[in-house]
Amino acid sequence: EVQLVESGGGLVQPGGSLRLSCAASGFTFSSYSMNWVRQAPGKGLEWVSYISSSSSTIYYADSVKGRFTISRDNAKNSLYLQMNSLRDEDTAVYYCARDRVDIVATIDWFDPWGQGTLVTVSS
Amino acid sequence: QSVLTQPPSVSGAPGQRVTISCTGSSSNIGAGYDVHWYQQLPGTAPKLLIYGNSNRPSGVPDRFSGSKSGTSASLAITGLQAEDEADYYCQSYDSSLSGFLFGGGTKLTVL
């Protein structure tokens, strides 16, 4: 069974840092690109970052560029999100999601998703 | 305010048909980028519902269908069931933003 399990969330003060992890199992992790997507309380989904299977290609949403760093360790089947200079507006549930791409579609989709980990930025 | 616009809410009685629209622009859906749809049941993570505008993953009932035309896409749900009550999100890509984007989400209420 394909499974993604996030961890590392918690309460952090504005300006602080936090590192999220996503443990993957049930598939060949090193063959897939991965994403982080977040959801503020009561709000919609916001794509945060993308990393290719070999880490050669990385993208960020403008809202986190320069503050967040995505990385992965294929030997450990793990995805990471280092979050620095955190702001109140970064408060959200953070999901990791496997990237899917196929000839039937012009852009990637996300499947499956982990259960999410809550990050709360507050003093 | 999302670049992809969805109605905040839709509703329907059991057995009825509802549609959820996702309206974009020339830099995303209108540029030829496909649309995917996700279902988020209360308190759970999003789940893929439709990919590549109209393809259903295995396990998704054929009551769910998707289409795309011009700068918009639609999700249709027929034979509404109580278990369909959830939030629905469209997803595409925007060349101006150089990133993936989601619609604001639509809350479906089964009356």
Image (cartoon, rainbow, N blue to C red):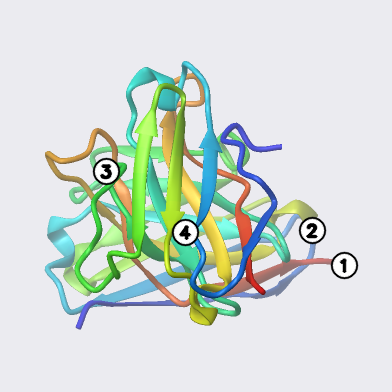
Q: Residues within 10 Å of mark 3 (few under 14, many from 20)?
A: many
Question: Tag 2, which secondary structure?
Answer: loop
The quadrant where residue A31 appears: bottom left
In this rendering, do the residues under marks 1 and 3 share a single chain?
no
**Pointer 2: what residue?**
A14
Give the CA separation, mark 3 to mark 4. Answer: 28 Å
Q: x, y percentage for residue B17?
A: 49, 59
Could you tell me how far apart the alpha carbons at marks 1 and 2 are, in whole angstroms? 6 Å
In this rendering, the answer to whether A83 lies above or below A59 is below
The tag on residue B38 is: none
Q: Chain of mark 2?
A: A
**In this view, the mark in front (3 or 2):** 3
Given the image, on which type of amino acid does mark 4 rest? Leu
Mark 2 burial class by Cα count in 10 Å: few <14, some 14-19, many 20+: some
State the residue position of label 1: A123
- Mark before the other along the chain sequence, 1 or 4: 4
To which chain does the residue with label 3 belong? B
* Residue A11 % position (x, y): 72, 75
Q: CA distance from mark 1 to mark 3?
A: 43 Å
Residue that carries the numbered disc 4 in the rendered image: A81
Amino acid beneath label 1: Ser
Mark 4 surroundings: few (<14), some (14-19) or many (≥20) residues within 10 A: many
Precedes in sequence: disc 1 or disc 2:
2
Q: Which residue corresponds to the image point at 47% horizontal and 16% vertical from the top-left?
A: B26
Viewport quadrant of the N terminus of chain A: bottom left
Q: Are marks 1 and 4 on the same chain?
A: yes
Name the residue carrying label 3: B52
What chain does mark 1 sit on?
A
